[in-house]
Image (cartoon, grey):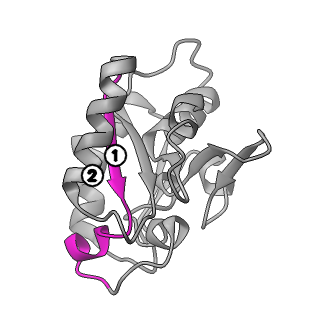
Amino acid sequence: MRLAASLNLNDWCLAAGFVRNLVWDKVHSYTVSTPLNDIDLIYFDPVRDSSDSDKAIESELRAISNLPWSVKNQARMHVRNDDAPYLSTEHAMKHWVELETAIGARISSSGDLELVAPFGVASLFDSTVTINPGRRKPADFTHRIKSKHWLELWPSLEVIDA
């Protein structure tokens, strides 16, 4: 978190699996964290909106931390998702496929931990995987559950797709 904060990116957070998996591990009483495929660092900067900027930040982070960073400027992700332009990181997260993934954490300018959770955190702690009712993409939802092996990794998860 401190490393990400040191980049001084606009409206940033570590999101998705970085937070979600930690909570699901705790809810399942795991004593060892489930390995992360990547660490999602998201931010919102309409001026610096090329994928090359993201790749440069990833390279910088990997060079000093040797961690599997994935950096995405949410100011350009609306194009990939065929949406109207997003207004902020939190607004972009409102378009994610499942509610429990739309969670992020950052260090505020005063040094406090802040959560970015457009749908709140209740479902995350309820051990559910819930399709985003405002972004119904059933095929994507099912694919993500299966390809990421969530039900195998966290067997008490309940899928909420209605």
Kindly identify which residue carries mark 2: 53
Q: Secondary structure at mark 1?
A: strand
In this rendering, does residue 131 appear at all?
Answer: yes
Precedes in sequence: disc 1 or disc 2: 2
The magenta segment is 67-83
Q: Is residue 68 magenta?
A: yes
**Which residue, as the protein is rendered here, is positioned at the far top?**
31
Q: Quadrant of residue 69?
A: top left
As for residue 25 lying within the magenta part, the answer is no
Q: Is 156 on the left-hand or right-hand side of 78? A: right
Q: Check disc 2 and report its element: helix, strand or loop.
A: helix
Residue extending farthest bottom: 84
Q: Position of residue 58 (x, y in %)?
A: 30, 37
Residue at the image position 57 percent from the left and 39 percent from the top = 5
**Of residues 115 and 24, the one drawn nearer to the viewer in this rendering:** 115
**Residue type at the position of mark 1:** Val
Q: Residues within 10 Å of mark 2 (few under 14, many from 20)?
A: some
Q: Which residue is mark 1?
A: 71
Seen from the viewer's position, the closer of residues 35 and 113 is: 113
Q: Residue at x 23, y 44 (%)?
A: 55
Q: Position of residue 113 (x, y in %)?
A: 73, 41
Where is residue 140? Give x, y as percent: 24, 63
Image position of 112 (left or right of 58): right
